[in-house]
Image (tube, helix red, strand yellow):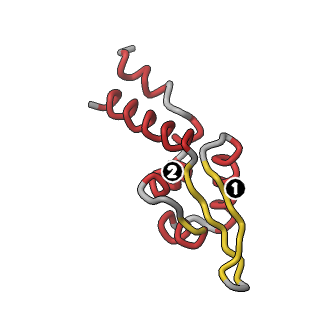
Amino acid sequence: MSKRLLEIADLDRVIHEPARLMIAATLYLVDEADFLYLQRQTELTKGNLSSHLAKLQEAGYVDIEKTYRGKIPLTLCRLTKKGRSSFHAYEAALKRALF
């Protein structure tokens, strides 16, 4: 098997899952995003988005802040420094494997 193909097997599994990849890619482009913005961008259900955000948070890739905008609950999400560097490494490894 070629070295390039083996690099695909070594991709970060936390990020590589399609829904988490969409979330990480969206958060990589912004400083922070609220839950509804992420839901609209990824087209995930509330339950799926919550589940995948929890996995990213457990890995230390996403910071989740629950707050309020006036009296309305607001969930803000942002990539941590570890999450940002992990996404960048994932992107570089994928490019090396494919190109």
Residue 89 point in image, percent of width and height: 44, 33
Label 1 CA crowd tier, 10 Å (few <14, some 14–19, many 20+): few
Comparing 48 with 35, the one in front is 35
- Residue sitting at 57 percent across and 64 percent down? 44
Residue 30: quadrant of the picture: bottom left
Q: Counting residues from the N terminus, which is met first, the one under dot 1 or under dot 2?
A: 2
Identify which residue is drawn at 65% across, 60% down: 48
Q: CA distance from mark 1 to mark 2?
A: 14 Å
Check disc 2 and report the residue beneath it: 24
Q: Quick check: 59 left or right of 6?
A: right
Residue at the spot x=71%, y=66% of the render? 66
Task: Please state which amino acid type lies under the numbered disc 1.
Answer: Ser
The picture quadrant where one finds residue 71 is bottom right
Quick check: 76 left or right of 30? right
Name the quadrant of the N terminus.
top left
Residue 13 — which label? none
Q: Is residue 74 above or below residue 20?
A: below
**The C terminus lies in quadrant:** top left
Q: Secondary structure at mark 1?
A: helix
Height in image: 38 above or below 13? below
Using the rendered view, name the quadrant where residue 51 is placed. Answer: bottom right
Name the outermost residue toward the bottom.
71
Q: Position of residue 16 (x, y in %)?
A: 52, 40
| Residue type, numbered disc 2 | Ala
User: Which mark is nearer the camera, 1 or 2?
Assistant: 2
The one nearer the camera, 65 or 36, is: 65
User: Pointer 2: residues within 10 angstroms few (<14), some, or many (20+)?
Assistant: many
- The percent coordinates of residue 22 (x first, y second) are 49, 54
Label 1 sits on residue: 51
